[in-house]
Image: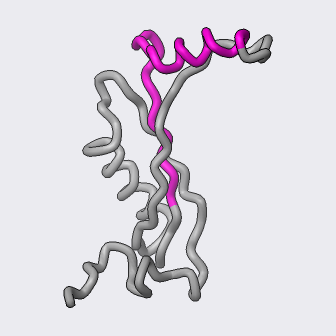
Amino acid sequence: MIFRVAVEVSGLEGIADPEGQTIERALPLLGFEGIGHVRAGRIFRFEVVASDESEARARSEELCDRLLANPVIQRGEVTVLGAVNGSDATGAGGRPPGEPQASA
């Protein structure tokens, strides 16, 4: 099966977040009052082939720990969004995700 996954990577509490601080300082100048504690981060979305949701989560957590987040200063939160339906189960060019594209 193919599962859609989202991984949110953000800085750990206590780690400086200059991007979030810059956004927070700009908010009142743009007319946005009452918003604080802004933290910037990244979201990665991808599809993973796995036998079930548990395996999809485990593979995604390993990817997050080994590549997407630096555990010294960041945390990653994995969310399995669900299985892809049959007609949507191919990547770009009609091939399963991760399958290399044929060369011309």
Rendered residue at 29%/23% (across/down): 72
- Say left or right for 63 vs 32: left
**58 is higher (above) or lower (below) than 37:** below
Q: Is residue 30 left or right of residue 9?
A: right
The image quadrant that residue 96 belongs to is bottom left
Q: Residue furthest front?
A: 29
| Foreground pick, 66 / 99 | 99
* Count of numbered tags: 0
Determine whether 19 is above or below 70 in the image: above
Rendering coords of residue 27 (x, y %):
69, 15
Q: 22 or 45: which is nearer to us?
A: 22
Display coloring: one colour
State yes or no: residue 80 in magenta. no
- Residue drawn at the location 48% of the way across and 32% of the way down: 41
- Taking the spot 47% from the left edge, 61% from the top edge, the residue there is 54
Q: Quadrant of residue 64?
A: top left
- The magenta region covers 5-29
x and y percentages locating residue 35 in the rendered image = 73, 15
Q: Position of residue 50 (x, y in %)?
A: 41, 71
Residue 5 pos. (x, y %): 50, 58
Q: Is residue 11 magenta?
A: yes
57 w.r.t. 15: above or below: below
Q: Is residue 6 above or below residue 41?
A: below
**Residue occupying the point 46% across, 82% down:** 90
Task: Say which of 23 and 46 sits in front.
Answer: 23
